[in-house]
Image (cartoon, grey):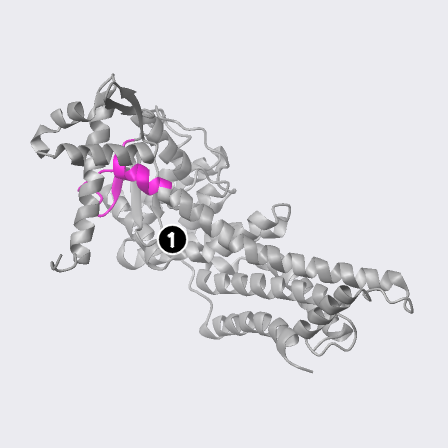
Amino acid sequence: MGGSPPTPVGKVAIVNRLGDLERAIMDVLWGTPQSLTVREVSAQLTERDLAHTTVMTVLDRLAKKGFARRERDGRAWRYRPAATREAYVTELMLTALDQTGDRSAALARFAKLVSGAEASALRGALDEIEGGGGG
Amino acid sequence: MTGPADAALLAVVAIGCVRGSAALGAARWPRRSPGAAILLWQALGLGGGLAAVGALIEVGLPAGSSSVANGVLRVAHMSASGDLFPASQPILPALLRLASLVLGLALLAQLCWVLPASAITAVRARRRQRELLVLLGRGDPKVPGALVVDHPAAAAYCLPGLRSKIVVSVGALDLLLPAELAAVLAHERAHLRERHDLVVLPFTALRRAFGWSQICADAHQSVALLIEMLADDRALRARPARALAGALARFGTAGCGGADSAPDGALAVSGAAHEGEMTARVTRIMTPIPPPPAAVRFGICCAATLIVVVPVALLVLPN
């Protein structure tokens, strides 16, 4: 109350910080074979000096987004990743490289994959480009 | 203005747009002047759509309607009061007129619907990409301002939008020389700065609506390629031609090439580029042909304007 409203710069900083936390916490989950409680996750993020509730909030966000799964263990929740890091990288790259379908219209790629015949034509072009600069 | 003469004129415009699209798709000059060609594609799409919808609706309106809106309202009144098929008139012509009107309105509804539908699909896919990139992307001094993803396959792309991002895979970092990486970034920044995604969106929507139509597929593919050429031209303002062409050639040959490039993380990807697209881009970068003279480009702009104005005038102007 009474404080100045957050500036856009401040907001961006908060968003970045939240993203950093999500990534750090997912890295902890990916790095551990068994599921972890909030306290156990906090314990692995010692250099960040985070409040217990902050870690809990971020884990909750990750669960809502579907990146983490949680299950009851007595009075605490235990969290584990919904999929491996490699699975998410593959999903990202499939969308990036897929050249058909609606989903692929969402982004613009620099280059497309080519057929064997065109690849050899391009290899010839590349030799010419490199030859022209190499002399 | 309504009547058989207008309907015939609109039908002529619609058929002309279809023929024009086929000719433009086959023409060689667009790669010399991608901006003007994109403008013409947009005009053909908009003008052709309006003319087709207009012709179908005009045929279906009752005689003596003072405007399209007035005619549609009269048909609505007639159907409400039950005298859509008066006993004094033969039923078949009336039925055919009604079918044409319904078809025209349905086409209009579909054209109006696919654009937001395609936009929503794209926005959702981008949101998912951004969520994943928060967890998986990292900065790298080799590509300032871009996010790097740990994957051995070569990829570089941009996510357009208000919170736009450029993404480069580790495979691409390994593949390209520093100057080539800088050219790729310049190309992607041009896409983002000029919102090329919004140019392609209506053509994506058309293709989605009329998946069976070869013309819509060709139009989409042509515009998508012209957008790449436009971004290539922008990148060439700040970067050497050899760097940009080199990056393209390396990307093109990386997937199916030498022993060192066999990717561990090879992905099953559908649909290779249409034959010759990448080569065409490399060729026009390395041996540029000057754009057509200003008078020709002015003529193209006039033609584009006419293609849209004529059907609008036919539909809107009173008798």
Please, is residue B72 above or below residue B250 in the view?
Answer: below
Residue A83, located in which quarter of the rendered image?
A: top left
**Start and end of the magenta stretch?**
B128-150
Using the image as rendered, state which of residue A35 and residue A27 is in the foreground: A35
Q: Say above or below: A132 vs A36.
A: below
The residue wearing badge 1 is B285
Measured from the top left, where is residue B53 in percent x and y? Answer: 66, 63
- Which residue is depicted at the point 37% across and 55% down? B231
> For residue B319, what is the image quadrant?
bottom right
Which chain does tag 1 point to?
B
Describe the element under mark 1 as helix, strand or loop.
helix
Res. B170 visible in picture: no
Left or right: residue B12 versus residue A75 is right
Q: Nearer the viewer, residue B278 or A47?
A: A47
Q: At which x and y percent is residue B274? A: 52, 42
Q: Residue at x 73, y 71 (%)?
A: B74
- Could you say which is closer to the camera, residue A40 or residue B247? A40
| Residue B143 part of the magenta-drawn span | yes
Residue at (51%, 50%) from the top-left corner?
A: B117
User: What amino acid is found at the position of numbered circle 1 in the picture?
Assistant: Ile
Q: Residue furthest top?
A: A34
Find out whether residue A51 is within the magenta segment. Answer: no
Q: Does B70 sit left or right of B257 as displayed?
A: right
Residue B127, quarter of picture = top left
Please give left or right for residue B14 compared with residue A13 in the image. Answer: right
Q: Which residue of the protein is positioned furthest toward the front in this rendering? A: A75
